[in-house]
Amino acid sequence: MRFTDLGLHADIVRGIKDLGYQRPTPIQESAMPAALEGKDLLACAATGSGKTAAFVVPILQRLIAKPRAGTRALILTPTRELAAQIAESISELAVHTPLSGAAIYGGVSMGPQEHALRTGVDIIVATPGRLLDHLRFPYCNFERLEVLVLDEADRMLDMGFLPDIRRILKRLPTRRQTLFFSATMPPPIAELSREMLHAPTMIDHARRAEPPALIDQRAFAVDGTRKSELLYDLITKGEIKDAIVFTRTKARTNRLAEFLEKRGVACGRLHGNRSQRQRETALDQFKSGKTRILVATDIAARGIDVQQLGHVVNFDVPHVPEDYIHRVGRTGRAGSAGEAITFVSPEEEKDFRAIERAIDRVVERIRHLDYTRPSADATKRPPARGPQQAPQRAPARGPQSAAPRAPARKPAESPRPFFHKGVSERPTGRAVTRTHGRSGGGPRRRRSR
């Protein structure tokens, strides 16, 4: 099948040809005919399979033949980067049409987004949280909505967006076409699809249990303290020319990026604590080749499309095998070759063995030079304390110690103050009267001297 066989508008076909696409991918070939007929769709498709065009092209075909009348399509997606990427795809595919789109996500000003909603652009791509911020105001109106798309639905579930999605659905027309895309189908997502879809067409291009065959997988056995050094060694020797390096936490992302930058390796960093402008800059510089390395958390594991990416490095082994699949899926896209490298420390062997069981493959561990040994700094231990090294406040006592000290003189008792924690004492002849409280109204007792 070719795109010309789908009966698409000539202006849409021109946009597809401008991007160099000749034939639909399997998910596009399966999903587009049903979507073009206006049917609801439930599709399981792996990240990187071309599903963005599988729903964008039918939306453009549906809207291009009708007069413009406000926002008529809404695409919900889990991350800012994926929202921006889908909006860019819409712009490229609709370049020869009068249709317009806009992305709505957090981390940037709401002003331009409000303007897009007020003017009624044809297609809105949004993250759930920021869309709910706009839905509080009357200018955010979806009364004319015809198509709703949920992209990466399982990822939105993982990120805790399910309650937000339900709140958004209450504000949308019930009569609409709904296209539902997910890489997996856990029970909550299956339940949500039953609520949203009417007699859907079912398409299963589910992700295989292992990465594509064109991806070469390697694993290095390495001490946890030597991972940064090993990565730098592989980069400087030319074994890694460009790569997305995945770390487990934001702090590790920052530390690794600083380690590489100090040694002259141009790299960007991508994680949730970076501002939207910083994240966009890091991605743009990496895609354009200004930086060779992009250090990222799993925020970049899905939906970030980097053409001809040579390597993916799992600096930290992911806890869940599915995360490994999504990370590795950033390379080897569109039939090109790629390489996935994983650094496995002794503490991470259990997690990596679980990944091997999931992909039904044993990945040989490579022992690179002496990186299996702890670094010199990690092996340093404080010297054992002896009589000459003991701190002055607590000298060691033993047979070699000096003559025993004279017992410390007990300090003389100081007279008790008249006022102590709310209790006053005043002399009254041969007895002391103790008064509790500020007003002196508490119980009293006498004691003789």
Image (tube, helix red, strand yellow):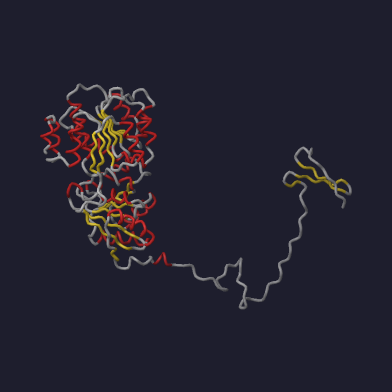
Residue 407 horizontal side relative to residue 19, left or right = right
Q: Residue 337 at what x, y percent from top left?
A: 18, 53
Return the residue nearer the eye: 139 or 31: 31
Res 375 → quadrant: bottom left
Residue 176 showing in the rendered view: yes
Give the answer, above or below, for where 115 lies relative to 187: above
Side (left or right) of 433 relative to 373: right
On screen, residue 370 versus residue 36, left or right, reads right
Residue 377 percent coordinates (x, y):
41, 65
Q: Nearer the viewer, residue 142 or 165?
A: 165
Left-right relation of 387 to 20: right
Image quadrant containing the N terminus? top left
- The answer to which of 212 and 231 lies nearer the viewer is 212
Q: Residue at 78% of width from left, 40% of height from top? A: 442
As drawn, 215 above or below 395 = above
Can see residue 79? Answer: no
